[in-house]
Every structure is written in C-alpha cells, then in structure tokens.
Image (cartoon, rainbow, N blue to C red):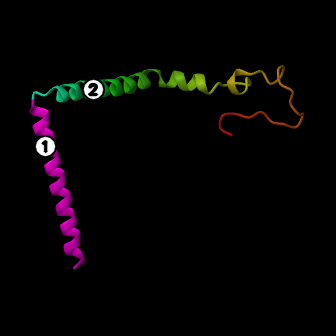
Amino acid sequence: MEESWDFEFLSRMVDSLVSFLSEFVDDWLANDMRVAVFKILFSWLIISLVAIHFAWKVYGNTVNDMYYRQGTGGQNGGTPDTGWERAAGDAMKTHRE
C-alpha cells in the first residue's frame, strides 16, 4: 500500500512539473513585454555570473594573497613588533589558527 502512495506522489509531482514547464514555454514564446523584460534580466544575470566566474579564475589567487598576507605583519597589515604591545609569551598567529 505504501508503494502506491509513493507512486501517486511522484506522479503528481511530475505532472505539476510538466504543466509548469509547458506554461513557461508558452509564455517564453509569447511576444509579451514582461517576457521580454524577463529575458533581458535573465540574460544579464547569466552574463554577470559568467563574468564573475572568469574574473575569479584570473584574479582569484591575487585576491587571496592580498587577503591572507604572508610574513610577520600580522592581521590587516599591522606591525606587531613595533606597533602593538605584546606579552613576552604570546606566539604570533597566522591565518590558519
């Protein structure tokens, strides 16, 4: 009995998805102003995401290196040896701690 309920639920979900997609395709093919606005905004979103992806591939390591500074400068570029007072037993923290 439980299997028939699962099949019925799955069948209803598939029917709902098919009806939604058919309405979406009908609206997409219509020459309506709201569809044109949707197409423009959707295209803008896709182009922006692709541009962000490629920019991160090109400049990602540079941004990462700028954020995690190497050396003894401390967090945010401070100078712990001269600018901050530190207890004698404190160890320097790195970005991995």
29 displayed left or right of 80: left
83 vs 40, left or right, is right
What amino acid does circle 2 point to?
Answer: Leu
Q: Quadrant of residue 86?
A: top right
Foreground of the two, 30 or 15: 30
Which residue: 16% across, 40% down?
A: 24
Q: Looking at numbered disc 1 in the image, what kind of residue is underneath it?
A: Glu
x and y percent of residue 80 in the render?
80, 24
38 or 45: which is nearer to us? 38
Does the magenta segment cover residue 62?
Answer: no
Question: Which residue lies at the image location 18% right of the left edge and 68% below the top edge?
Answer: 8
**Label 2 residue SS:** helix
Please give left or right for residue 53 compared with residue 34 in the image: right
Q: Where is mark 1, residue-wise?
A: 23
Does 38 appear above or below 5?
A: above
Where's residue 42, x and y in %?
A: 26, 29
Q: What residue is pinned by disc 2?
A: 41
Q: CA distance from mark 1 to mark 2?
A: 19 Å
* Magenta highlight range: 1-30
Main SS of the magenta segment?
helix
The location of residue 55, given as percent across then percent down, is: 41, 22
